[in-house]
Image (cartoon, rainbow, N blue to C red):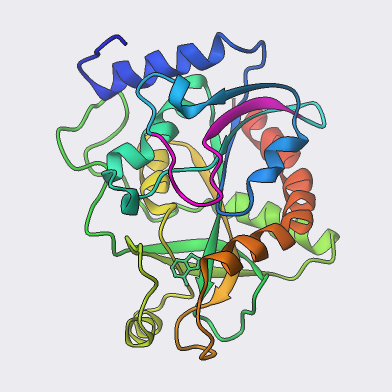
Amino acid sequence: MTILSDDFARADHAAQFALARTRLRPRIGVVLGSGLGSFADELRDAAIIPYDQIPHFPRSTAISHAGKLVIGELDDLALAVMQGRVHLYEGYSASEVAFPVRVLARMGVRALVLTNAAGGINPLYSKGALVLLRDHINLLGQNPLIGANDARFGLRHPDMTDAYSVRLRQLAKEESAGLGEDIFEGIYAAVTGPSFETPAEIRFLRTIGADLIGMSTVPEVIVARHMGLDVLAISCVSNMAAGITGEKITEQEVVEVGQSVRGRLLALLRAVLPRIHAQIAAQQ
Ligand code: HPA
């Protein structure tokens, strides 16, 4: 494999590798979280590229994360879909975790839709609820932008005020209403895991304003904003967080609840993605 000296060259190399495998030129990237990966099976005319074939890409080891980049069409809309992601708890740094987002951006993606499974802290939520992220709290102890800044990617200190696009959230709320789907908005706190939290940690997180808790998404959002992508992030509440109901949390329920909301999430994405595409086109 070619050794390239910087992340920009590595991201470009991986992007060119992926684009050489398809005639499609997606403007929207989608990242699928735990138990949500089957969305990628809906794509037609798909180029399916396992992460271990893509130069410089991290390998996914997490449960129920397939580890494939699928470039295909959903209802004639070209998408670049990451079926599975990597996490800090697998031993990767925040910048390694977010590297695939750099690749999507170098492929020409302008908007990123992230999905994840998360624990519900807000007592208004219940298992299976869908929540649009409106902000986050980074408790990873890491930031993917630590190290020398490459100005070709973005600014040294990118603004995070509207990290989760107000307009894209508005579109998602409108489409949810049209589908009769009750959707929430909430604040996502990111921790490294891999152990789930203690009830005392969850009480702390509730006090500091978190509605959801999860082990992903935040590094990807930071890198996406660094590169100027619009971000929409949707959590599926796979379990109520530790101590909220007293029930124990199992990995299996995280995956199973993800699978059970699949249909609702797919319907929402089907409705929202064309509108995001129209929005990007209008900006150009
Ligand atoms: N905590 C952290 N991450 C999670 C959880 C949780 O309860 N559920 C799904 N991802």
Q: Position of residue 115 (x, y in %)?
A: 57, 52
Q: In which quarter of the image is the N terminus?
A: top left
Asked if residue 103 lies in the magenta stretch, the reply is no
Quadrant in the rendering for residue 247: bottom right
Quadrant in the rendering for residue 284: top right
Residue reaching furthest left?
148
Q: Position of residue 113 (x, y in %)?
A: 58, 44
**Main secondary structure of the magenta stretch:** loop
Up the image or down, 96 lies above or below 192; here it is above
212 left or right of 174?
left
Q: Where is residue 68 in the image (x, y as percent from the top left)?
A: 55, 32
Up the image or down, 77 lies above or below 158; here it is above
164 left or right of 131?
left
Asked if residue 69 lies in the magenta stretch, the reply is yes
Q: 146 and 36: which one is in front?
A: 36
Query: Residue at 54% across / 28% down in the picture?
Result: 109
Q: 175 and 245: which one is in front?
A: 245
168 left or right of 91?
right
Residue reaching furthest bottom?
246
Number of dots carrying numbers = 0
Q: 47 and 19: which one is in front?
A: 47
What's drawn in magenta, residue-wise?
59-73
Q: Where is residue 14 in the image (x, y as percent from the top left)?
A: 42, 18
Query: Residue at 36% across / 41% down in the picture?
Result: 97
Quadrant in the rendering for residue 223: top left
Query: Residue at 55% across / 61% down in the picture?
Result: 117
